[in-house]
Amino acid sequence: MKHSIKSLIFLLIFAFSCENKDSVLIDSEGNSYTIKDYDGTWWMTENFKGRKDKDGNSIIYYFPNEDSNNVNEYGLLYDYETACKICPDGWQLPTNTDWEKLLFADADSSAIAFKDVNFWEEEVNTNNSQFSVKPTGYGNNGEFDNFFLSRTYFWSKTDREEDIWTFIFEKGKNKIRKAEQHPTYAFAVRCIKR
């Protein structure tokens, strides 16, 4: 009996340790991110916060609301060129097709199913998807309002001539918008693995 109880405990510990390995991504700097499988594609459910590219080179990044204290909760913001080279090996920046498959897979999809319940003031969100979008705003050298706590822009790898597609979550709106942006702005990054 003692042997079977020890075996059961070992199996439970092993199962939980394997589950944790499958639900966490660790980048080359040791930052960890929760990840989730959405219909065969693994997505980070937190914003990227690395300060080097996947080859260990220094990169340009912006703090949300120009405050380094926001990094742990909101991640960092990157221009498009940088966003294309920071995902860990085996991971990549999602395309429009990837974003649309995730965000619009269900006819009833709305932003409330993707927004973190604790970070959008005066809103009732469900985060049923567990994607946990937080209102990071964007980085722009302080020249314009950065929309911190009211918007989040996510880069897509898909470009259109000189502009790049983004997917936008806004305070007080249930619709997820898709719009072109200039590649020098700095937005949030989520990486995927197929």
Image (cartoon, rainbow, N blue to C red):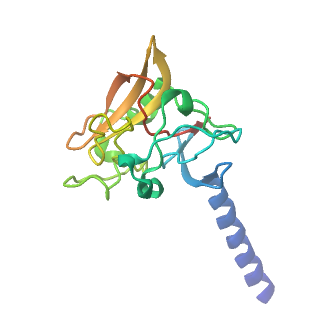
Q: Is residue 138 left or right of residue 147?
A: right
Residue at 40% x, 28% y is: 166
Residue at the limit of the structure toward the bottom, as seen here: 2
Q: Is residue 133 visible?
A: no
Quadrant of res 179: top left
110, 11: nearer the viewer: 110
Q: Quadrant of the C terminus?
A: top right
Expressed as whole percent of the image width and height from the top left, the position of residue 73 reads: 43, 56
* Image side of residue 29 versus residue 47, left or right: right
Q: Quadrant of the N terminus?
A: bottom right
Residue at far right of view: 3
Could you tell me residue 3's position as x and y percent?
Answer: 80, 84
Q: Say which of 131 and 11 sits in front.
A: 131
Circle count: 0
Residue 154 in view: yes
50 and 108: which is toward the camera:
50
**34 vs 194: above or below:** below
- Residue at 37% in and 51% down: 128
Position of 67 with respect to 43 (left or right) is left
Find residue 188 and report its image quarter. top left
Vertically, is 7 above or below 186?
below
Across and down, in percent, residue 5 comes to 73, 83
Q: Nearer the viewer, residue 59 or 15?
A: 59
Drawn side of residue 86 relative to residue 13, left or right: left
The residue drawn where x is 29% and y is 48% is: 149
Residue 158: % across, % down? 49, 21
